[in-house]
Image (cartoon, helix red, strand yellow):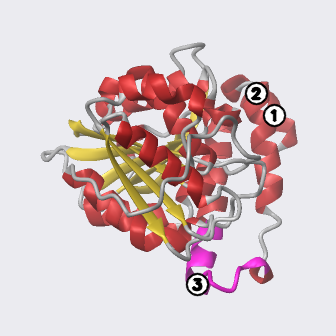
Amino acid sequence: MLDRLPAAKHFLGNDITSDVIVRLGDDKDYRAEDRPADYPAADWDETVANIIRLDTALVDQALSGTAQPLGAIRGLGETFVLSAKDGTNQPIAVYVPSGYDPSRPASLAIALHGRPQTETELLGPPWLRRLAEASNTIVIAPWGRGNYDFVEPAGSEVYDVVDAAEHAFAIDSHRVYLVGYSMGGFSVFKVGPLHGERWKGVMSIAGALLNSETDEVVRSFARLNVYVVNGGDDANIPPKYGAQTAEVLARAGLSVGLYQEPHGTHALRTLNRVLTQAWNDMLAGRVHMDHVPSAGPPLQAPPSLTHKTLPT
């Protein structure tokens, strides 16, 4: 592959080419003995196989200089979306449910990954894909250039992904949602307000709202539902941060739901029960608020998000 790097760099640019080389190295390190005890063996094997397959597809397309057409993807796939900022090819992982019918517009969820997770590591595991399959929702996870908190131009490129999806698939523009996990759960409160009118609902999983963002989020999210999902035993992002987020937004008059799994951790797989409830509520346009004691004002600054978020 190294002798073909100039072609990949022309397609991806130097930074993303470097990122891809790193992730391929990481892919080689997955071992069966690394599977957590509570991660079903079949799901683990599927997760690892999916991540390797998606990353390999990314490289194959970069080396050939030809992206797979987004609208041709069925099931789980990887392709690219052109950035309106600079015309570069930006990787996205895609899941199109088996029930998708172009004659019946589907719902769309854009999913923001954690740190240092990749888009393939977010959709490779079965958790979001199972929700997508059951609800006939197309899910797309952008790489976001690997930028911390999807800072520009990655934030604006999330909307390039929405535009590309609405062009490639039959999408109900009134059922478009922004979802984020871990770092992505913080990032929804930065990316979402850029064009709040594009979303029907916003979901933060194992994330939180920062104090500095409150005014803009309240203004931009005034007409949509907000869903906060976390685990009561999350040692990375303490659950009180999610409770604070929900309380602050609810006091500001927003329609907000809090879904807390009492013994859930930071791992996405431990939140399946409440995540399913929140996902179904989001698509139905309803909210549920778990009863929690007042936990004080929102965060002034985020905690460290540099922990490894895979396996989820």
Left/right placement of residue 141 relative to residue 116 reads left
Q: Which residue is mark 3?
A: 40
Badge 3, how many Cα within 10 Å: few under 14, some, many 20+?
Answer: few
Classed neighbour count for the residue bearing mark 2: other residues with Cα under 10 Å, few (<14), some (14–19), many (≥20): some
Based on the picture, tell me whether residue 35 belongs to the magenta stretch. Answer: yes
Q: Is residue 59 visible?
A: yes
The residue depicted at 54 percent of the width and 73 percent of the height is 270
Q: Which residue is mark 1?
A: 5
Query: What residue do we see at 68% from left, 51% from top?
Result: 117
Cα distance, mark 3 to mark 1? Answer: 37 Å
Q: Amino acid at mark 3?
A: Pro
Mark 2: amino acid: Lys
Say which of marks 2 and 3 sits in front. 3
- Tell me where residue 206 appears, x and y as whole percent: 56, 55
Mark found first going from the N terminus, 2 or 3: 2
Quarter-wise, where is residue 131 in the image?
bottom left
Residue sticking out furthest to the left? 103
Asked which secondary structure carries label 3, the reply is: loop
Residue 65 seen: no
Q: Which residues are magenta?
A: 34-49
Check if residue 192 falls in the magenta segment. no
Q: Quadrant of the N terminus?
A: top right
Q: Which residue is mark 2?
A: 9
Distance from the alpha carbon under mark 2 to that under mark 1: 6 Å
45 on left or right of 25 = left
Vertical order, 217 against 272 (above or below): above
